[in-house]
C-alpha cells in the first residue's frame, strides 16, 4: 500500500445551537487515517490564491481588483443599497474568505461612491439563528455598524413581474434602490441545478418567498427549474436595482479568487467552464468509488460538508452524471455509500434510503431517530466505537471524511489507494470525452 501523508486538520467547528453536541475529537485524528492532496490526484487543478490558515488580505485585494472593472456611478451618496449575501457562503473553507469578500465589497463601494448607508441583507435557509451566529462570529454587525437585515423564505414577499408571470421575492432583500449580489461558486447540489445557471440559483433559494422557492425546489432536478431564477434575475424589477455581482471563486484545491460583473449571465458562463473542468473531475472521481463509509465531521448542514472541496451530497447522489443535461438526473442514492457515521453536523432532515447511520453519541442517535427519516440508526458512545460498528456492519475499511477540507481529502489508506489509482483515467475521460459534451450542451466553447 502507498505511503500517504498524515491527515490535515480541517477548519475548526464553531459552537452552534444548530448542531449536535460539540465533538471531543475530530475524525482526522482517528488512528490510521491519511491525507491525499487534490493536486496529487489532478495536477492540472491550479494552485489556489488562499488555503485554510492564510491571511484574508489576498481576498480583499482580489475583491477590490474585480470591482475595478465595474461601473458604480449609478450609486449616489444618499441612495439605499443592499449587499445581498447568503449563509451558505460561510461554509466554504471555514467561511473567512466569503466574510472578507462581503466586508471588502462594503468598504470599496463606500470609498468609491461616498455612500455610508450600505446595508447587509443576510439570507438564512430556515431561521434567523443561523445568521445571528454567523454575524457574531465574523463581527459583521460591527463592520456594518448595525445596518443588517436578516430574512428567510417565510418573510413578507414582494410581487415581481417576470416573463413567466408573477413571482415573489423577499421584500427585505429588495427594499433598496440598489442591490449588489455577493455570492460564491461552491457547486453544492449538482444533482439539482446541474451546473446550469448555477450563479443565478440564489435568486430563488436565498431571495425568493417560499411559494416561488418551492416551484424551483420541487422541480429539481429538471432543467426547466432553472427558468425560475433566470426569470427573476432578468425581470425589470430586479434589473432596475441590480448594480453588479461579486463572486467568490473556488476549486477543490482552495479559494481561487474573486470575479465581478454587471452582467451575471456572462459571469455565470465564465464560472461554469471552470467548475465543470475542475469540480467535474472530483465529482467523477467520487462516482468511481466502489464502496465506502462516509464520516460527517464538519460545521453546518450534513449534506454540505466538504472533502477535497466537494460537498458530501455530490457523493450521496452519485454515480449518475448530473452534469450531462441529456440524461435523467434522478438518483435514489449512491449504492457505494454503505454507511454514514455522524460525529458532528447541524441538525437537519436528511435521509439516504436503505443506508444505516451510525451516531458517535447517543444524543445524536436520539435526534436522528426523532426525524424518523432513516432506514437504520445505530448508537455509539464515542467516534471510535461508531467506526468499529460501521466497519462490522459494512465490511469495508474504505473511509472518506467530510470535515470541511479543501486541497486534500482525509480518508483511510484503503480509499486513498483507490482514489490515486483511478484519478488518471477519470482525468482523461473528463478532458477528452465529458468536457466537450458538457460545454456543447451549455453552448459554451
Image (spheres, helix red, strand yellow):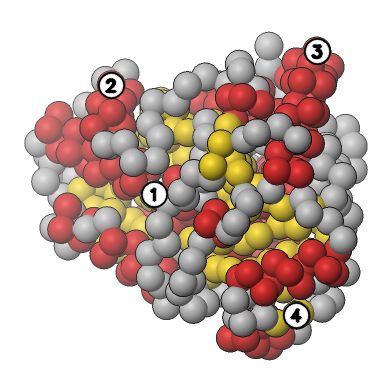
Task: Write down the residue under mark 1.
Answer: 95
Quadrant of the image occupied by residue 293? bottom right
Tag nearer the camera, 3 or 4 = 4
Task: Write down the residue under mark 4.
Answer: 378
Residue 434: x, y in percent?
A: 81, 21
For marks 2 and 1, the one nearer the N-term is 2
The nearer-to-camera label among 2 and 1 is 1
Residue 65 marker? 2
Q: Is residue 186 above or below residue 16?
A: above
Query: Of discs 2 and 3, which sits in the foreground?
Result: 3
Of callouts 2 and 4, which one flags the residue occurring earlier in the amino acid sequence?
2
Query: Vertically, is 94 above or below 378?
Result: above
CA gap between label 2 and label 1 equals 21 Å
Quadrant that contains the C terminus:
top right
Q: How much space separates mark 4 and mark 1, taking CA atoms? A: 32 Å
Residue 311 seen in this snapshot? no
Q: Is residue 342 left or right of residue 99?
A: right
Q: Label 3's element?
A: helix
The image position of residue 282, as x and y in percent, is 69, 33
Q: Residues within 10 Å of mark 3 (few under 14, many from 20)?
A: few
Secondary structure under tag 2 reads helix
Q: Residue 33 versus residue 150: which sits nearer the camera?
A: 33
Q: Is residue 322 above or below residue 30?
A: above
Pick the front one: 409 or 181: 409
Which of the two labelled residues, at mark 2 and mark 3, occupies the earlier sequence position? 2
Quarter of the picture containing the N terminus is: top right
Q: Which residue in the structure is indicated by mark 3?
A: 432
Q: Earlier in the sequence, mark 1 or mark 3?
A: 1
**Which residue shows up at 79% across the image and 28% down it?**
421
- Does dot 4 land on a helix, a strand or a loop? strand
Q: CA distance from mark 2 to mark 3?
A: 34 Å
Q: Secondary structure at mark 1?
A: loop
Amino acid at each position: 500500500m502507498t505511503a500517504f501523508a498524515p491527515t490535515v486538520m480541517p477548519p475548526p467547528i464553531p459552537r452552534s445551537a444548530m448542531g449536535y453536541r460539540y465533538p471531543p475529537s475530530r475524525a482526522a485524528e482517528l488512528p490510521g487515517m491519511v491525507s491525499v492532496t487534490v493536486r496529487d490526484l489532478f495536477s492540472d487543478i491550479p494552485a489556489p490564491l488562499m488555503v485554510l490558515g492564510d491571511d484574508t488580505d489576498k481576498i480583499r485585494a482580489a475583491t477590490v481588483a474585480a470591482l475595478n472593472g465595474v461601473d458604480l456611478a449609478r450609486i449616489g451618496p444618499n441612495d439605499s443599497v443592499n449587499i445581498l449575501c447568503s449563509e451558505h457562503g460561510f461554509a466554504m473553507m471555514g467561511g473567512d474568505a466569503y466574510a472578507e469578500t462581503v466586508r471588502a465589497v462594503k468598504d470599496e463601494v463606500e470609498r468609491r461612491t461616498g455612500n455610508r448607508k450600505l446595508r447587509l441583507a443576510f439570507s438564512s435557509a430556515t431561521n434567523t439563528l443561523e445568521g445571528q451566529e454567523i454575524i457574531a462570529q465574523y463581527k459583521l454587525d460591527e463592520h456594518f455598524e448595525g445596518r443588517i437585515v436578516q430574512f428567510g423564505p417565510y418573510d413578507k414577499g414582494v410581487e415581481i413581474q417576470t416573463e413567466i408571470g408573477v413571482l415573489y421575492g423577499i421584500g427585505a432583500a429588495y427594499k433598496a434602490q440598489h442591490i449588489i449580489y455577493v455570492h460564491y461558486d461552491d457547486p453544492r447540489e449538482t444533482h439539482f441545478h446541474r451546473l446550469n445557471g448555477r450563479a443565478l440559483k440564489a435568486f430563488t433559494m436565498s431571495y425568493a418567498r417560499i411559494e416561488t422557492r418551492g416551484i424551483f425546489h420541487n422541480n429539481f432536478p429538471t432543467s426547466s427549474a432553472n427558468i425560475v431564477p433566470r426569470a427573476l434575475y432578468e425581470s425589470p424589477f430586479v434589473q432596475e436595482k441590480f448594480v453588479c455581482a461579486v463572486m467568490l471563486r473556488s476549486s477543490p484545491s482552495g479559494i481561487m479568487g474573486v470575479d465581478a460583473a454587471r452582467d451575471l449571465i456572462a459571469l455565470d458562463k465564465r464560472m461554469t467552464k471552470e467548475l465543470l473542468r475542475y469540480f467535474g473531475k472530483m465529482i467523477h472521481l467520487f462516482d468511481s468509488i466502489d464502496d465506502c463509509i462516509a464520516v460527517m465531521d464538519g460545521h453546518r448542514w450534513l449534506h454540505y460538508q466538504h472533502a477535497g472541496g466537494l460537498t458530501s451530497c455530490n457523493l450521496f447522489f452519485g454515480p449518475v452524471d448530473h452534469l450531462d443535461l441529456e440524461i435523467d438526473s434522478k438518483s435514489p442514492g449512491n449504492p457505494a455509500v454503505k454507511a454514514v457515521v455522524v460525529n458532528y453536523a447541524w441538525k437537519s432532515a436528511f435521509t439516504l434510503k436503505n443506508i444505516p447511520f451510525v451516531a458517535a453519541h447517543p444524543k445524536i442517535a436520539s435526534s436522528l431517530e426523532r426525524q424518523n427519516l432513516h432506514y437504520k440508526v445505530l448508537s455509539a458512545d464515542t467516534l471510535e466505537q461508531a467506526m468499529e460498528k460501521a466497519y462490522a456492519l459494512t465490511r469495508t475499511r474504505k473511509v472518506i471524511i467530510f470535515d470541511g477540507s479543501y486541497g486534500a481529502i482525509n480518508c483511510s489508506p484503503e480509499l486513498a489507494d483507490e482514489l490515486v489509482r483511478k484519478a488518471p483515467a477519470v482525468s482523461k475521460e473528463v478532458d477528452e470525452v465529458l468536457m466537450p459534451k458538457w460545454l456543447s450542451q451549455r453552448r459554451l466553447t
